[in-house]
Structures are given as structure tokens and as C-alpha cells.
């Protein structure tokens, strides 16, 4: 018996109890959600064990690292797909620790710009290197062609989802 | 200019700031996470607006609905991919509202079994019908063949992720 198949079949998650009578689009969504939850849980656990770091903190540092220069708090929140208030306390702590630099913009003092300090960049690079390794290990069964096809299909999905949510927002 | 493409490109999310130099597996993961977050946010908002229902409540009801008979609290938590404690308070409220039935197993009184009441099943079916419609609308750009290919690639990914996480758990 293939243990990997057995594991995948008996694993209890959002797909449990689905029947082939359920709609394919719903089954795609629940499998997508299950994959995201599994990967996120693994990353969360390894971040804690290896670096004593929470996932929200890693996500904030990753966005600031990839940003070209400083980000406004609003832009940072949009990239994290959360509300502004959720990020403020975390940024406060990162500023105190010397990992993030925060300053008002000269022309509009209400807009706070945040960026990684050199110390913050160095600290994040070490964690990011491990993070890449964890993701690579979790995706090791997929060859480059499969990854490319998955990436392209997820682009189709993202466009389809955004078309619906954008339309609704425009309609009020 | 294609507005849909423009929207997808300018949308700020977990993929923002990625360059083509970043590893393909990391780009797949961030796109998967972005899709999951977008769909989940839309479902959360519509559940609240249309049915005054939270997403955790919907998820619990969906698992109980799809279960064949009653589930132990442990099995329910595993399917929801959360810890037991997170579900207990929600189940308490659902029992008070007459939506969920909870009883001890005859041979082990420490194990609580939960199931939907007939009232709970009827209430959930109405919401589930709307939910299917929201998912269908968000995936409308993908034809059946694309959905099938995405479903199959996500199965490959899920198996790959589970192989890593299972191995680690076995190793302690």
C-alpha cells in the first residue's frame, strides 16, 4: 500500500465528506483552501520553532523586504490583505526593536512611511532563506512543468475572482 | 487596455514586489495564498451581509452537514484544521440555538459527539446554496477542463505537502 496515498486519503480536512456529486468548482475551492492551510500551518510551526517568530511578523517583514523603498501603512495593509489597525501594533514593536524605520511624509504628516532598517534586512534574509527551503521541500513532488502549469491556472483563477469582487465593489 | 488584466496587475497582495528572479515554488505559494485570501474574504463578507453569519460558524456547519452522522469534537477540529478549544465555544452556542445536538458516547463519556439537528440541516442548506453560487461566480472564467486540471495539480501539491509534514511529525 502506498503510504503517501493512504495519508492523503485519510487526512481529515476541508475536503472531508465531499462526494463526487459536489460541484467541481466547490471541490477546487476546498482543495485550494486545504493546501493553503496545510502550508501555512507548517510555515507557522517552523517559524516558531526555528526563529521564535510569528507568521504575521514574517509576513510584514517579507512585504517590507520586497518593497522598493518605503511603504505607506495603507499600502502595507493592502499587500497583507488585512486592515490597517491589525498592523499598527506589530509595526510599533518592530520600530522599538530597531527592525523597522517609521517616518511621516514631508508633504502629508498624516501618512506614515515604513521601511526595514539595515539590521531588519539582515535579520529577515536569514529567515527568508529557511522559508524558501521549507516551501521547496513541501513542493518537491511537483516538477518545473507542473509548477508552471499550476502558476498559470492560479493566475486564471485570480483574474476571475478579482473580476467579481471588483465589480461588486464598484457597484457599492 | 484590458481592464481585467490591469486590475489583476495593480492589485496589492502577497504577490506584490515579487520579481521573476524569485523561485517558481515560492511564487506558486504566494499566488495560492492570494487566491485563498481573496476567495475567503469574499465569502466572509457575503455570509455576513446575506445571512448575518460568521465564517467559522459556516465552516463548522458545513463539516457537520457533510459528515455521515455525528462527529467527535476531535474529528470535527481535524476537519476544520484548528485546535479543539477553538471550536468548543462555537458549538456551545449552536447547541443553545437548537442547531447542533451534542451527546456523550455510551462507552466513553469523555468523548462528545456532535451532529446537526433537522432544524440545523434546513438552515444550513439555504446558506450552502448561496455559497455554491458565490464560488461559481468567482470561478466563472475557468472552463471545466481548466478546473479539472487545477483540481488535479492541487492533489499533487496536497500529497507533496502531506508527505513532508507527516514525516516531520513521525520524527517527533
Image (spheres, coloured by chain):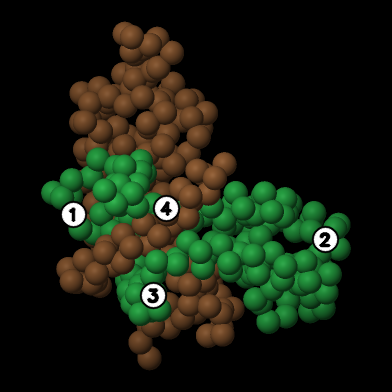
Chain colours: A brown, B green
- Residue at x-position 56% and y-position 75%: A16
Q: Secondary structure at mark 1?
A: loop
- Work out whether disc 3 and disc 1 sit on a shared chain: yes
Q: Nearer the viewer, mark 2 or mark 4?
A: 4
Q: Which residue is mark 1?
A: B23
Chain under disc 2: B
Identify whether B45 is placed above or below A116: below
Chain under disc 4: A
- Work out whether disc 2 and disc 1 sit on a shared chain: yes
Q: Which residue is mark 3?
A: B143
Q: Which residue is mark 4?
A: A162
Quarter-of-image position of residue A145? bottom left
- Residue at x-position 72% and y-position 71%: B125
- Marks 1/4: CA–CA distance: 24 Å
In the figure, is residue B152 to the left or right of A143?
A: right
- Marks 3/4: CA–CA distance: 17 Å
In the figure, is residue B57 to the left or right of B146?
A: right
- Marks 2/3: CA–CA distance: 41 Å
Amino acid at each position: 500500500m502506498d503510504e503517501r496515498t493512504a495519508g492523503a486519503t485519510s487526512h481529515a480536512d476541508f475536503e472531508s465528506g465531499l462526494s463526487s456529486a459536489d460541484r467541481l468548482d466547490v471541490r477546487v475551492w476546498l482543495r485550494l483552501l486545504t493546501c493553503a492551510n496545510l502550508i501555512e500551518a507548517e510555515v507557522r510551526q517552523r517559524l516558531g520553532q526555528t526563529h521564535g517568530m510569528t507568521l504575521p511578523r514574517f509576513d510584514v517583514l517579507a512585504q517590507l523586504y520586497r518593497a522598493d523603498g518605503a511603504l505607506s501603512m495603507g499600502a502595507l495593509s493592502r499587500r497583507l490583505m488585512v486592515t490597517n489597525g491589525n498592523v499598527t501594533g506589530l509595526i510599533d514593536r518592530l520600530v522599538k526593536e530597531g527592525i523597522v524605520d517609521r517616518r511621516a511624509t514631508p508633504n502629508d504628516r498624516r501618512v506614515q512611511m515604513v521601511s526595514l532598517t539595515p539590521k531588519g534586512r539582515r535579520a529577515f534574509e536569514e529567515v527568508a532563506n529557511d522559508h524558501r527551503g521549507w516551501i521547496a521541500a513541501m513542493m518537491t513532488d511537483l516538477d518545473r512543468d507542473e509548477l508552471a502549469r499550476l502558476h498559470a491556472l492560479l493566475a486564471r483563477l485570480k483574474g476571475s475572482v478579482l473580476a467579481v469582487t471588483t465589480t461588486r465593489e464598484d457597484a457599492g
